[in-house]
Image (cartoon, helix red, strand yellow):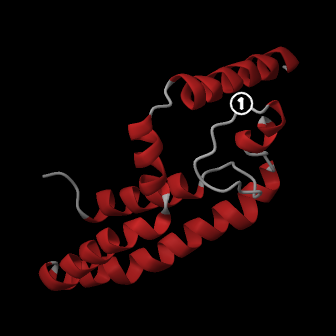
Amino acid sequence: MPHILDFMQRIDTSLFFFINDDLANPFLDWLMPMITTQQNWYPFFLIIIGMLLWKGGRQGRIVVLLLIPLIVLSDQISSSILKPLFDRVRPCQAFEALGRVNMLIGLKTSPSFPSSHAANSFAAAAFFAHFYPRR
């Protein structure tokens, strides 16, 4: 088992530096902080909620009514239960001492795994897939 964990750690480190060093460029350095800043997504979410309330009928109102507590629950499970349980240091913290980390935003000190963005997005996607199945 330790060999597998060592192998996974080497892959994790290699991927981090490949993305952080080799894929770094001015366009992505400008774009990625905008994409990952949560506040930049608020207008999009408000438009989706507005469309569901306006055009979605009864089902749309139910979806909005249930979606908000679902996201709150998903976020709390991810950040209050799972992150402390795994307590995985963010790669930018782990490698900061090497001086090779291209930081585009401030250094966060909270645990990195699981990603609350990913957990919330998956919860919303699964929820929408349930209420709006492909026809």
Q: Residue at x 66, y 56 (%)?
A: 106
Q: Dividing the image into 4 quarters, which one contains the N terminus?
A: top right
Q: Is residue 20 left or right of residue 59?
A: right
Question: Hey, which quadrant is residue 11 in on the image?
Answer: top right
Q: Which residue is mark 1?
A: 100
Residue 95 x %, y %: 78, 34
Foreground: 134 or 26? Answer: 26
Q: Residue at x 58, y 22 (%)?
A: 18
Foreground: 64 or 19? Answer: 19
Q: Is residue 125 left or right of residue 3?
A: left
Question: Hey, which quadrant is residue 109 in on the image?
Answer: bottom right
In the displayed structure, would residue 23 be above or below residue 93?
Answer: above
Counting every numbered tag in the picture gives 1
Residue 102 x %, y %: 63, 38
Disc 1 residue crowd, few under 14, some 14–19, many 20+, Cα 10 Å: few
Q: Amino acid at mark 1?
A: Arg
Q: Is residue 93 left or right of residue 78?
A: right
Q: Is residue 122 left or right of residue 81?
A: left
Foreground: 80 or 134? Answer: 80
Q: Residue at x 75, y 16 (%)?
A: 7
Residue 31 x %, y %: 40, 47
Which secondary structure, mark 1? loop
Residue 125 x %, y %: 37, 56
In the displayed structure, would residue 64 be above or below residue 114?
Answer: below
The residue lying furthest to the front in this view is 26
Q: Residue at x 56, y 66 (%)?
A: 74
